[in-house]
Image (cartoon, coloured by chain):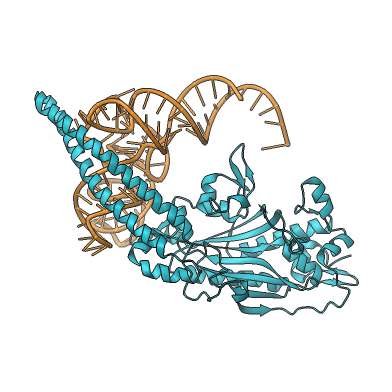
Amino acid sequence: MLTLKVITENPDEVVRKLAKKHFDAKEAIAKVLELDKVRRSSQAQLDAALAEINTLSKSVGSLMKEGKKDEAEVAKNKVAALKESTKTLQESMDKSQEEINSILYTIPNMPYDDVPEGKTAEDNVVEKMGNDIPELGENALPHWELAKKYDLIDFELGVKISGAGFPVYKGYGARLQRALINFFLDEARNAGYLEIMPPTVVNQASGYGTGQLPDKEGQMYHCEVDDLYLIPTAEVPVTNIYRDVILDEKDLPIKNCAYTQCFRREAGSYGKDVRGLNRLHEFSKIEIVRIDTPEHSKESHKEMLNHVEGLLKKLELPYRILHLCGGDMSFTAATCYDFEVFSAAQKRWLEVSSVSNFDTYQANRLKCRYKGADKKTQLCHTLNGSALALPRIVAALLENNQTPEGIKIPKALVPYMGCDIIK
RNA sequence: GGAGAGAUGCUCGAGUGGCUGAAGAGGCACGCCUGGAAAGCGUGUGUGCGCCCAAAGCGUACCGGGGGUUCGAAUCCCCCUCUCUCCGCCA
């Protein structure tokens, strides 16, 4: 959520910036300002009343000791009267604070100035293309057929065991998963990320911390008996490590990476876009997470983009990098780049990573702060990105690398696969 | 799942109604001392909110969370959550 401070200090600027996300914040901001006034005046009055109560209460003790019973009684009565007034003041303060918060939850993050204008995915800006799109010829098979042909992934078996969107990987298919996971983790470690293996099930507080709750409640699997949620991404447990934490500036930037299974209900998805590996309920992903200072977070973001690009280069997959326009960005991001790989048989681009800077938006909700040399405590910036999500990488690898002899394994993966071709 | 114990600041830990935002110790930071270091000595060391912003200062709230009793609660009462120990089950 946005900080109350930024809203009260620069309301017009906030409205202007949010317009890029096609979010009309005018009314919400006005309401917040109004409620904030109420809250402040309530608190001023409340604090004054409480101060008097405290003073009077202290005097009661000494008056009693001195045997001035009557005076003590007077003080007692005064306190009783004051207490009545504190009740309503407290209520008014709590109520306005609550309303402010509930409004703040509905206001998205402000995009950075360099975020492109635009409304939909059509308006995203292609920043860069890399690696050549292969010529496959007429008989190229989509990955779901290749998976069958080489007995790598059994979608029907997954349906039997769990349901649609839960594929079973077999043999080289399973090995390819493990190879990619290890490759991505090794690359992250070499780039200075600390490997974390977090729980894949989280409590409500964590869901709120990273913003999956309350708005995306329906997208997560929920174990109701224990009130726990299956994580949709490692971002949730890894970022929540820093919930309610005050970090030391010299420990920043924090660089964590984690491989986890990710679970998404994907309610409402259907059709050919979800065929094969394109959209799953459970999949493997390696996530990189950074916590940084406001001054350095842009630099961190660049490094993360370079890291992800490096992975795609090594995998020799045709890719493009999109700078998402204001309208297509997520609710919480201040700026976001998507990485897509070209799936040569499906002839379409598949998103394999989103690398975002959330500025202080997420940190404010998390209460993740740091203290610098000046002893001042302030909010961190949080960033994260996939590096990378497996299924669509596998789809592209299978399709792009199909040959009459089998599926060629890119050089970088050969040590992890133990072979250079799947026959 | 059964029985018991507990939850206080960065950490340990004292504290059974007012003088406690909190003793004491450790840690950490700064200063003195030293050729340098250690030891020693001294000082400092939470967060939120408010008082126009910032600093200083002041006020207020916070001793797991919520409610209550009282003029006054870390301290008494109720509810909840979590942690630990023992037993049972178990990868």
Outermost residue toward the right in this view: A404
Q: Identify the residue at horizontal 39%, vertical 53% (top origin).
A: A100
Image quadrant containing the C terminus of chain A? bottom right
Position of A310 relative to A242 (above/below) = below
Image quadrant containing the N terminus of chain A? bottom left
Position of A330 relative to A52 (above/below) = below
Q: Identify the residue at horizontal 46%, vertical 54% (top origin).
A: A365
Residue A237 x, y percent position in the rendering: 57, 51
Residue A376 x, y percent position in the rendering: 34, 59
**Of the pair B51 and A146, the residue shown nearer to us:** B51
Outermost residue toward the front in this view: A27
**Of the pair A99 and A384, the residue shown nearer to us:** A99
Q: Can residue A125 be seen in the rendering of this structure?
A: yes
Who's cyan, chain-wise?
Answer: A
Left or right: A223 as drawn, with respect to B12: right
Left or right: B4 as drawn, with respect to B61: right
Who's orange, chain-wise?
Answer: B
Q: Can residue A247 be seen in the rendering of this structure?
A: no
The picture quadrant where one finds residue A341 is bottom right
**Of the pair A218 and A383, the residue shown nearer to us:** A218
Residue A232 x, y percent position in the rendering: 63, 53
How many numbered circles does the render carry?
A: 0
Left or right: A137 as drawn, with respect to B8: right
Residue A74 x, y percent position in the rendering: 12, 29
Position of A316 relative to A76 (above/below) = below
Left or right: A365 as drawn, with respect to B76: right
